[in-house]
Amino acid sequence: GKSFLQAVNVGQGDSYVTWQNGKTCRIDKPLLDLSARISARDKAGVQTQIDKIMAHMHSVSREFCQGAENVEIDLTAGLDSRTILAILRSTGYPTEKIQSSTIGDENSGDAQTAQYIAKQYRFSHRCIPSSQPDRDEFLQHLDLLAYSMNGDTNGQRAVVNPLPQNNLNQAPHLYGGGGEIYRGYLYPSQPNQLCAAWSIPEIACYLTEKFVGRRRQVAVSEELAPLLYERLQHRIAGYQTQSSHVADILDLFYLHERFAHWGALAVRGSWWSHYFTPFGSPTVIRLAFQLPAPIGVKQRLHHSFIKRHLGKAYYWPLINHETFLPLSQLSTTQQRLIQPLQQTYFWVNRKLAQNNPFLHKSSRNLSQIQTDAFATSLRDTVRDILLTHNGITSQMLGRKSGEQIVQNHVGARKSTGQVVGSLLTLERWYAQIKKTAELASSYHT
């Protein structure tokens, strides 16, 4: 486990690697320039920059969809997918040629919201029902994900999503991957906390609780725990050389460690060439980091696209059944003043959930379907992979902790779907690496 951890190189903002003259070459130069920022007091400058970002997203999306007979999109109750629809409409692409889909039960909140929006704008929508995944297809898809993303992705995607087909006539598919960067995914719930000066240990502690939780769903081995924490603090210190603002540090952490835009995600296009996310454009990311920190405050980019190009879905339905988008544009002081009224509104809304077509909590969404599959139809497969002798799980977490994760998840005592999914992909990738090394050594003997 220790040797494996030390051999993992994560793309960082202070340098990058290129392929030159048949070998890798490290360039010690930041990928992002965070020195030239627009002042928060320059309201006109901020809006001009937002318009510039929107224009670029509009341009690359129009180019991607140009000449297509149909364009596919994912549509849920979330903010990112609604923004993608707004971006597509901004390109002038005929609305009637849009084909949207939602994976999950027909009565789920995601499906009901998507159907409502599709009806308002008169484009087709289909709900993709869940079915018990085939073990062989799941493993084949999991192996492809592991290989194409260097193990740096969640294996949950292999449960329901179909295998990519090398079909040149396949319709372009727009999706909202990476949208979290522009809406402050890692920001603390209290906006005023972003104004405080955080130390490196404080940021490390915050991120640990954010991803692992105070109850510690995953118990890392005693040998690796301090090394992982030391590595995390080292990464944070590197981000601080680019910016001292805590929001920038959290955004950079998400960009490099979670979204992996300049890492594993870069090779994804060769396997899913008909998929495209305008949020992942390097130009968009660079332009966004010229905005004043925090760049994700008020979800300005999402808000602007939806308000301008998807007005019928601006006020209703609520984002994820709980967020009224126009309120996100209020100042911190204004939000505090209306907070009691907002809490009362959401309390009443929850009480009326049984009669609200957008709040069917009894139906499962995509994430719940994927998590359930690991605990039911794929449970033996999950157990066999995670408890592989000398595998990643055993090395990093220890055999006992690995068994506990499997037992808790299969027994439905804890929902650890994302943890299990990430470990599954890592295990298959690690197996591929070892097999490749064995084959390579056989040629030299």
Image (cartoon, rainbow, N blue to C red):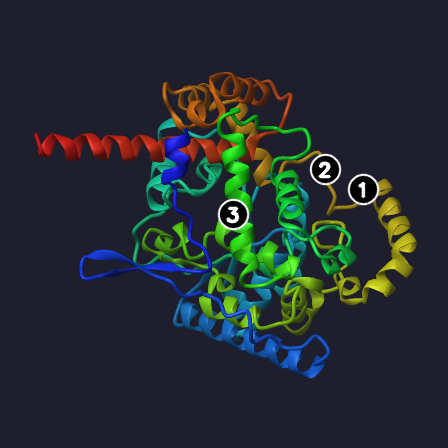
Decide: few, some or many residues near mark 1? Use Cα within 10 Å; few <14, some 14-19, many ≥20: some
Q: Residue at x 66, y 35 (%)?
A: 213
Instruction: Check residue 353 in the rendering and tell me which mark sits there, or answer none.
Output: 1
Q: Are marks 2 and 1 in contact (CB under 8 Å)?
A: yes
Which of the two labelled residues, at mark 2 and mark 1, occupies the earlier sequence position? 1
Figure quadrant of the C terminus: top left
Decide: few, some or many residues near mark 2? Use Cα within 10 Å; few <14, some 14-19, many ≥20: few
Q: Is residue 176 visible?
A: no
Looking at the picture, which amino acid does disc 1 mark?
A: Ala
Q: Residue 68 placed where, x, y %?
A: 40, 67
**Residue located beneath label 3 in the image:** 234
Which of these two is toward me, 309 or 39?
A: 39
Q: Residue 122 placed where, x, y %?
A: 61, 63
Q: Secondary structure at mark 3?
A: helix
Looking at the picture, which amino acid does disc 2 mark?
A: Lys
Spatial CA distance of label 2 from label 3 is: 42 Å
Which of these two is toward me, 30 or 226?
A: 226
Using residue 210 as the reference point, say whether residue 236 is left or right of it.
left
Using residue 300 as the reference point, say whether residue 176 is left or right of it.
left
**Residue located beneath label 2 in the image:** 361
Is residue 288 shown above or below 407?
below
Is residue 161 shown above or below 267?
above
Which of these two is toward me, 99 or 204?
A: 204
Closest to the camera, between mark 3 and mark 1, is: 3
